Image (cartoon, helix red, strand yellow):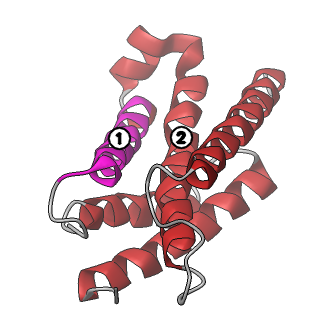
């Protein structure tokens, strides 16, 4: 099935976001809204998620839409915590950087789950690797992404702890 115009924009912005996110995590070990790359990442991620809510490949609300909502909430929560002096000083205190990074880093996982799904259900074009959402390969891919995410998140949070 070919991509719609919204799907094309969604895919381009999502790809830009993923590359920016990986670059930030590789170079800085965190996604920072204060950097130009961080602003591009968060903006592209937010727009990609908003566009995902307009894509109905299967005609109804599905898990990808749920991930899009989680992505929007994670970006908004991270920005709110980071930018609100009340939330930083009164509510989260010394935990602010951990919560902000949890919000921003989780958006990488939220990008990769539907990305993996799209790749496995579309390629190779004549015989996709996965033909059903119940396919064990898809579930193993999700589990692998989640395990790698948890490992990297623990390493990131430990790195943040050592920055004090």
Quadrant in which the C terminus appears: top right
Image-based side of 120 in relation to 4, left or right: right
Look at the picture and state if 90 lies above or below 42: above
Q: Which residue is mark 2?
A: 106
Left or right of 126? Residue 57 is: left
The magenta region covers 61-81
Residue 109 in magenta stretch: no
* Tags 1 and 2 touching, CB below 8 Å: yes
Which badge, 1 or 2, is on the more N-terminal residue? 1
Of residues 30 and 120, the one drawn nearer to the viewer in this rendering: 120
Q: Is residue 133 left or right of residue 94?
A: left
Residue at x-position 70% and y-position 33%:
153
To which residue does mark 1 refer?
70
Tell me which residue sits at (33%, 86%) in the image: 3
115 sits to left or right of 144: left
Nearer the observer, 151 or 27: 151
Crowdedness near tag 1: few (<14), some (14–19) or many (≥20) residues, C-alpha within 10 Å: some
Q: Residue at x 23, y 65 (%)?
A: 58
Which residue lies at the image location 59% right of the left edge and 58% below the top edge?
35
Residue 89: where, in percent of width, then height? 44, 15
Q: Secondary structure at mark 1?
A: helix
Q: Is residue 162 above or below residue 44?
A: above
Residue at mark 1 to residue at mark 2: CA–CA distance:
9 Å
Q: Which mark is residue 121?
A: none
Closest to the observer: 111 or 123? 123
The quarter of the displayed image where residue 147 is located: top right
Relative image position of residue 4 (x, y in whole percent): 26, 86
């Amino acid at each position: 099935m070919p991509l719609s115009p919204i799907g094309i924009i969604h895919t381009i912005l999502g790809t830009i976001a993923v590359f920016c996110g990986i670059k930030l995590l590789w170079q800085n070990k965190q996604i920072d809204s204060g950097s130009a790359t961080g602003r591009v990442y968060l903006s592209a991620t937010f727009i990609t998620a908003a566009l995902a809510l307009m894509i109905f490949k299967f005609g109804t609300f599905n898990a990808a839409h749920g991930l899009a909502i989680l992505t929007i909430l994670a970006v908004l929560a991270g920005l709110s915590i980071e930018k609100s002096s009340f939330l930083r000083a009164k509510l989260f205190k010394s935990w602010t950087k951990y919560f902000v990074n949890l919000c921003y880093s989780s958006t990488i996982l939220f990008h990769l789950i539907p990305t993996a799904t799209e790749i496995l259900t579309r390629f190779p074009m004549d015989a996709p690797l996965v033909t059903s959402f119940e396919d064990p390969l898809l579930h193993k891919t999700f589990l692998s992404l989640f395990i790698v995410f948890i490992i990297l998140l623990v390493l990131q949070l430990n790195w943040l702890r050592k920055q004090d």
